[in-house]
Image (cartoon, rainbow, N blue to C red):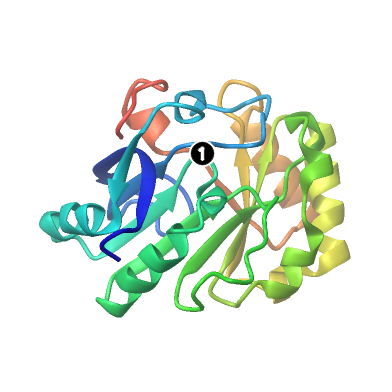
Amino acid sequence: MKDRALVVNEVYVSVQGESTFAGLPCVFVRLTACDLRCSYCDTEYAFYEGKKRLLENILEEIRSHQIPLVEITGGEPLLQKNVLPLMKVLCDEGFDVLIETSGAHDISQIDSRVHCIMDLKCPDSGMEGRNRYENISCLKMKDEVKFVIASRNDYEWSRQKVREFELQDKVRTVLFSAVFGKCEPQALVEWIVEDKLPVRFQLQMHKFIWEPKKRGV
């Protein structure tokens, strides 16, 4: 652990803005770098900005906040191999650990105690071709699959994927999230209700509490 490091964009405390953990106090560890370029990305600053930090130093900061919920996000956290031992230690110490990942990288090596929140990239993201569908067989019942929806076309594509892979039977929940400023939340809710889809609608809560582009929240 002593010689292992990660490039970290920021560590901060806020409330969870998404997923079934929404509203809970959480320590966020945002790692640097991403190899996708989604059209709606709201964390482009994490592509390159960051400092190398030893894992033990990161752990000390997380412990200091005395909050049991920790989310590892990015960027794309799975681009850095040392994220795996970081999550293992956090789980060993009794933290409830979440990871947000694009779905473009192998999730099979993630500690089984971690709650994986995995995207399936919709067509309007421009990154649909990067979906690693092999990951679906690695998902656990405690995990969540997220579709970030920018249009009716994205919705219909997502609906088809939920049904094709029977996602509601494979994970804790399937999340349908409206792209802020692009997809009207009311419309998305109406589509879900009309089709009686077994999915959970969500908003990016933090964008309604704070100014939408505010960092560290």
| Amino acid at the residue labelled 1 | Gly
Evaluate whether residue 20 shows in this view. Answer: no
Q: Which quadrant of the structure image shows residue 71?
A: bottom left
Q: Is residue 24 left or right of residue 111?
A: left
Evaluate whether residue 187 shows in this view. Answer: yes
Q: Residue at x 24, y 65 (%)?
A: 68
161, 64: nearer the viewer:
64
Q: Which quadrant of the structure image shows residue 187?
A: top right
168, 1: nearer the viewer:
1
Q: Which quadrant of the structure image shows residue 136?
A: bottom right
| 162 w.r.t. 176: above or below | below
Residue 54, position as x, y percentages in the image: 28, 52
Residue ID for mark 1: 75
127, 3: nearer the viewer:
3
Q: Residue at x 67, y 30 (%)?
A: 38
What secondary structure is marked by label 1? loop
Residue 59, position as x, y percentages in the image: 23, 59
Residue 83, position as x, y percentages in the image: 44, 58
Count of numbered circles on the image? 1
Q: Is residue 102 left or right of residue 62?
A: right
Residue 194, position as x, y percentages in the image: 77, 49
For the C terminus, the image quarter is top left
Near mark 1 (Cα within 10 A), the count class, few <14, some 14-19 or many ≥20, is: many
Q: Residue at x 39, y 72 (%)?
A: 88
